[in-house]
Image (tube, rainbow, N blue to C red):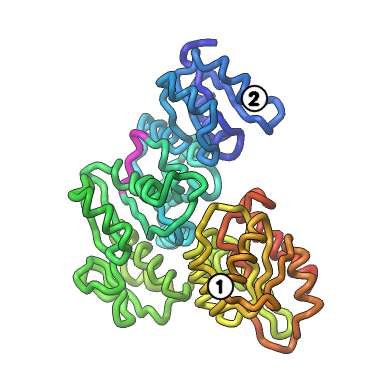
């Protein structure tokens, strides 16, 4: 095996994308995955490390013994985002790269920026943590004016030369504590999206986020230029105050006419508008789009009704803060909660559930701990239903709920799905299919 071999760890979407792009460039690939037939196992792969020049780790893979061995041998660890970025720069890509991260709102902001740009006649595409891998998109790139990347903290860990033209952190709240040493480690990883920018870049700074501002105070001045956003500070470049969203002093839209409802979506909209304004879209185009655009799938998606029951798919609600948004919008709801154990402190959630939910169905591996925390917080045991699965929860509702009483059935799990599903998309799709079957 030649010294220029590249080890790609993970044969999922990002790994396959990176392997395909590198293979097209003439690199020899060692594809490693313990679960996919035909791939090298991670144990076997340790024997290939001496001949490995570059190690591409899929974002979802933790720092396993194989990864640590590669690091000990001083082999550069990167991911598909970095591979794709290097490829585009080598090919002279002249469009803009827009990078979106944050604990909540990433998918909505990424999707809606892309849709808005397309509605204005731009040739834009989204990738990263949604859709096709960035490496796959880069290999097929054909004159895209903008590429909008949703970037998770996992994807930000192993970037190196990557530079975004416009970067943003929407917000920072606790998440992924099963992966990081502590909250500060998680938040610092998120801030790499700004740390890697150059002086030609623009960073969108959320003045309303204490965690973002605390880190910005330690890092300023950033190398990138900064545009500020706020729902309370009239001195910010982009504001949403007293029902009017303004861009650098210009009225853009009336907030009560936005089709994306809720305080969290007002925050998201500020980032969408700021990006569009920086890219030169006219105010009337921005306004028309945001008055009529539809909710993103799996994020507060009202998809079904049966008699007086309304069903809302918020499978994208994978942390406590996102479920807080959902609960506040659905007082008196029947809540489906739980999934993979991300080692959260569930205490803040318990008070929200007690306030907003009339019933709680618990699913997934977090069922025992959530039931215990909710009982300790004073939730009535009679409204707690440890169900285990979505199907059992929905069938119990079908048998016991009064269809003539108006209620919202809300799937907002407050955690990820990996204990029972491939991802939150699969969880959301199955929830919708089961709902339509049972109701």
Count the marks: 2
Q: Quadrant of residue 312?
A: bottom right
Name the residue tied to disc 2: 41
Where does label 1 land, which residue? 377
Above or below, comparing residue 346 to residue 74 in the picture = below
Q: Dot 2: what SS?
A: loop
Name which residue lies at 26% across and 51% down: 202
Instruction: From this view, report whether residue 136 is shown above or below residue 418.
Output: above
Looking at the rendering, the stretch of residues picked out in magenta corresponds to 160-165
Is residue 37 positioned above or below 162 on the image? above
Number of other residues with Cα within 10 Å of mark 2, as a class: few under 14, some 14 to 19, many 20 or more:
some
Residue 426: image x %, image y %?
A: 66, 54
Q: Looking at the picture, how far across and down is residue 404, in whole percent?
A: 73, 89
In whole angstroms, how far apart are the C-alphas of marks 2 and 1? 46 Å
Q: Is residue 147 visible?
A: no
Mark 2 or mark 1: which comes first in sequence?
2
Residue 202 forms part of the magenta stretch:
no
Which residue does the image show at 55% across and 16% down from the upper left?
Answer: 48
User: Hey, which quadrant is residue 360 in on the image?
Assistant: bottom right
């Amino acid at each position: 095996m030649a010294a220029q071999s590249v080890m790609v760890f993970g044969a999922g979407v990002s790994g396959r994308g990176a392997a395909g792009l590198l293979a097209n460039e003439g690199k020899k690939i060692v594809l490693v995955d313990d679960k996919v037939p035909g791939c090298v196992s991670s144990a076997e792969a340790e024997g290939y490390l001496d001949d490995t020049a570059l190690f591409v780790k899929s974002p979802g893979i933790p720092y396993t013994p194989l990864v640590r061995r590669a690091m000990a041998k001083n082999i550069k660890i990167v991911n598909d985002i970095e591979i794709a970025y290097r490829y585009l720069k080598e090919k002279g890509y002249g469009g803009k790269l827009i990078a979106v991260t944050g604990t909540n709102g990433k998918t909505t902001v990424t999707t809606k920026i892309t849709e808005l740009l397309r509605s204005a006649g731009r040739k834009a595409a989204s990738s990263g943590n949604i859709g096709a891998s960035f490496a796959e998109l880069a290999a097929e790139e054909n004159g895209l004016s903008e590429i909008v990347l949703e970037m998770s903290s996992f994807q930000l860990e192993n970037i190196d030369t990557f530079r975004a033209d416009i970067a943003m952190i929407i917000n920072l709240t606790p998440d992924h504590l099963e992966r990081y040493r502590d909250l500060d480690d998680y938040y610092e990883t998120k801030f790499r999206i700004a740390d890697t920018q150059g002086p030609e870049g623009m960073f969108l700074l959320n003045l309303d986020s204490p965690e973002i501002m605390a880190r910005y105070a330690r890092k300023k001045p950033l190398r990138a230029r900064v545009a500020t956003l706020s729902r309370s500070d009239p001195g910010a470049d982009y504001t949403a105050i007293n029902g009017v969203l303004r861009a650098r002093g210009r009225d853009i839209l009336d907030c009560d006419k936005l089709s994306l409802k809720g305080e969290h979506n007002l925050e998201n909209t500020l980032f969408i508008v700021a990006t569009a304004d920086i890219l030169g879209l006219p105010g009337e185009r921005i306004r028309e789009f945001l008055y009529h655009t539809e909710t993103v799938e799996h994020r507060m998606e009202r998809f079904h009704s049966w008699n007086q029951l309304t069903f809302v798919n918020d499978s994208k609600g994978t942390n406590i803060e996102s479920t807080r948004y959902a609960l506040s919008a659905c007082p008196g709801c029947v809540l489906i909660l739980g999934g993979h154990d991300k080692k959260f402190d569930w205490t803040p959630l318990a008070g929200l559930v007690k306030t907003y939910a009339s019933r709680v169905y618990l699913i997934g591996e977090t069922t025992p701990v959530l039931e215990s925390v909710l009982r300790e917080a004073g939730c009535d045991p009679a409204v707690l239903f440890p169900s285990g699965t979505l199907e059992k929860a929905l069938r119990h509702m079908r048998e016991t709920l009064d269809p003539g009483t108006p209620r919202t059935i809300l799937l907002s799990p407050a955690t990820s799905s990996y204990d029972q599903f491939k991802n939150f998309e699969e969880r959301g799709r199955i929830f919708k299919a089961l709902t339509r079957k049972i109701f």
